[in-house]
Amino acid sequence: MSETIIKLNNVSKSINKTKILDNFNMCVLKNDIYGFIGENGAGKSTTMKIIVSMMKENSGEVVLFNNHSKNDSYINKGRIGAIIESPAFYPYLNAYENLKYYVIFKGIVDKNSISKVLKMVGLEKTGNKKYKNFSLGMKQRLGLALALLNNPDLLILDEPLNGLDPQGIVELRETLSILNKKYGITMLISSHILDELEHIATRYGFIHKGKMIEEISTRDLEKKLRKYILLEVNDVVYATTIIEQELNSTNYEVIENNMIYLYDYVENSEKVSSVLINAGLLIKRMNISNISLEDYYLQLVRGGE
């Protein structure tokens, strides 16, 4: 069993009498790239702020690195690097100079720490280029370098892909993957760009209205994000009857009253079309699709309401 890095037990938080987290539970394991998914206002940022002590929970328990001792909380926090709110950098300083300011501010004694983290995020060759001339992707990676200065075991990143162009997303995604695989850094990452999380996440947590509605490994999730035949027909009720009687399948869903997701016969869709046409149905649309991560989240949300 992997070591538990973050454990939240029945954590609740209200702000101005509005409940943000409601008996919220979370478990992040060592070496996870944990994709934290939820709509705006679901409680993602509040959760992260509580973990890094930017905010205090009203009730519940926050356990870091499997250490329940309150006396070691300062040491635990020192093992965390985070980007929750955009860090401030001086526009007329280069990457090295900006980080040097923070090294002095944080009291970091390792003289090689700046060169090390710039190499880790791929900014070691930016030279004298000023921060104001950085691309958004480079700015994000400099923020990541700042979070790495204290040599953390855990990185917490709130919407790190937000605003990046496709090239910037790919570069940051590759950097995060290297940090996890090469340096063994556990990550908690929130993002609304769900298809990008699919490229790197090893586990997921889905939050809705302040509650954790599911935690799942990537392997188990992939089994659920299965292929299906999308059918749009002129008579859904009759079509489902034919599917059950002629194809002996109840493994389908009716979506928005005019489409059917059929999970059987994906490798033999010709039989499906033949049976439906022979039954007198008009097939308006038929293709093989996958359930997206976004669709899966929406299904979870609908199931919990």
Image: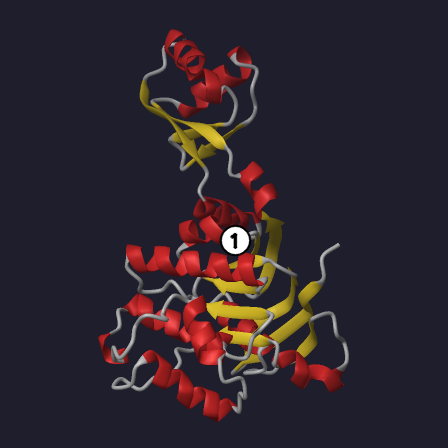
* Viewport quadrant of the N terminus: bottom right
Q: Position of residue 287 (x, y in %)?
A: 36, 26
Q: Nearer the viewer, residue 247 or 220?
A: 220
Task: Specify whether residue 119 is in view.
Answer: yes
Above or below, 184 relative to 287: below
> Residue at image x 37%, y 31%?
258
Residue 62 position (above or below residue 56): above
Here the colouring is secondary structure
Drawn side of residue 276 relative to residue 305, left or right: left
Q: Choose between 302 and 43: the one closer to the eye.
A: 43
**Which x, y percent locates residue 124?**
37, 71
Q: Residue at x 51, y 34 (%)?
A: 226
Q: Is residue 151 above or below residue 37?
A: below
Q: In this orientation, does residue 88 appear?
A: no
For label 1, count other residues whose C-alpha is less than 10 Å away and answer few (under 14), some (14-19) or many (20+).
some
Which residue is outermost to the top?
278
- Mark 1 residue element: loop
Taking the spot 29% from the left edge, 69% from the top edge, the residue there is 136
- Determine the image quadrant of residue 72: bottom right
Which residue corresponds to mark 1? Answer: 201
Q: Is residue 284 left or right of residue 299?
A: left
Q: Position of residue 113 (x, y in %)?
A: 49, 79
Residue placed furthest toward the front: 112
Q: In this rendered view, identify the residue nearer to me: 295 or 232.
A: 295
Which of the two residues, 295 or 203, is positioned nearer the viewer here? 203
Residue type, mark 1 in image:
Ala
Residue at the image point whose x is 54% and y is 69% from the top: 155
- Relative to 115, is 107 on the left or the right? right
Name the spot of residue 27 as percent of width and height, x first: 66, 62
